[in-house]
């Protein structure tokens, strides 16, 4: 088992059984995510659909996880996803496909996403969960994301469209031209779509990861 700490992201699509063409759409979106995330050196292996609507990846850049989570949510629109993240060791040499690997990080990721499905941590619905060997980190990160997920569930398709465009090209005037709307509409969609809270969450949890691991 390798001594290095890895992060495994294990995710699935909410309500997938009622969505026609889910496999094709998920495959298209994950191909986009894999290309961008590998280009940014956020992940070690491309996303792999492991069973039905479930998919996973692995990274040794723990601090990239918050950026990955935010980028996955905007890239996979209109598919709402649950994400479990596990930090730990991996038992085999790192090579594709990711679903053939195992170890502590994968076990923690499975525990994390099962916690999301059963709402074990809180008395409110969440979409994101961390499981690591550091209990204080888990408590803090899960509370931050639990509160953020309350906002994520309220973001509309139009607001996600604006967030997506802004993350590709962070300039309000440029986004307005691209989407053919006025500047005030872009500003309003970013604000009402909680983009600034989402980006601040990613920045704060990135720092928390760097200080803990």
Image (tube, rainbow, N blue to C red):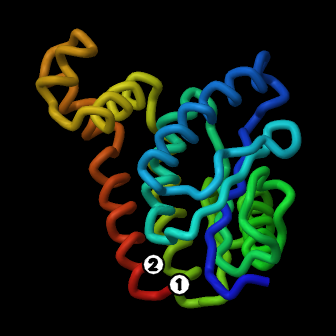
Q: Judge by depth and name the residue closer to the eye, 115 or 54.
A: 54
At 67% from the left and 45% from the top, the residue drawn is 47
Dot in front, 1 or 2: 2
Residue at image mark 2: 209
At numbered mark 2, what does the secondary structure look like: helix, strand or loop? helix
In the image as oriented, which residue stretches furthest toward the top?
A: 180
Q: Residue at x 50, y 86 (%)?
A: 213
Residue 51 x/y as whole percent: 88, 43
| Pointer 1 or 2: first along the chain | 1
Q: Which mark is residue 62?
A: none
Pointer 1 local density, CA inside 10 Å: few below 14, some 14–19, many at least 20: some
Q: Position of residue 43 (x, y in %)?
A: 55, 56
* Residue 50, picture quadrant: top right
Residue at position x 42%, y 50% in the image? 40
Q: Is residue 123 above or below residue 196?
A: below
Residue name at image x 82 percent, y 54 percent: 99
* Rendering coords of residue 95 (x, y %): 74, 59
Q: Is residue 147 left or right of residue 93?
A: left
Distance from disc 1 to disc 2, alpha carbons, whole Å, reads: 8 Å
């Amino acid at each position: 088992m390798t001594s290095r700490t890895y992060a495994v992201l294990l995710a699935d699509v909410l309500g997938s059984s009622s969505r026609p063409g889910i496999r094709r759409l998920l495959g298209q979106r994950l191909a986009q995510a894999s290309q961008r995330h590998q280009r940014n050196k956020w992940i070690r292996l491309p996303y792999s659909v492991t069973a039905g609507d479930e998919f996973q990846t692995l990274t040794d850049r723990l601090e990239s996880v918050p950026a990955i989570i935010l980028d996955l949510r905007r890239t996979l629109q209109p598919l709402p996803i649950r994400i479990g993240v596990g930090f730990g060791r991996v038992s085999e040499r790192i090579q594709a496909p990711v679903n053939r690997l195992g170890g502590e990080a994968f076990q923690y990721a499975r525990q994390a996403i099962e916690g999301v499905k059963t709402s074990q941590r809180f008395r409110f619905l969440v979409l994101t969960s961390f499981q690591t060997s550091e209990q204080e980190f888990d408590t803090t990160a899960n509370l931050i994301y639990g509160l953020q997920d309350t906002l994520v569930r309220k973001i509309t398709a139009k607001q996600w469209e604006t967030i997506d465009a802004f993350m590709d090209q962070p300039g309000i005037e440029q986004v307005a031209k691209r989407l053919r709307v006025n500047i005030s509409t872009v500003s309003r969609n970013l604000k009402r779509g909680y983009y600034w809270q989402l980006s601040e969450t990613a920045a704060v949890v990135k720092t928390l990861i760097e200080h803990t691991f």
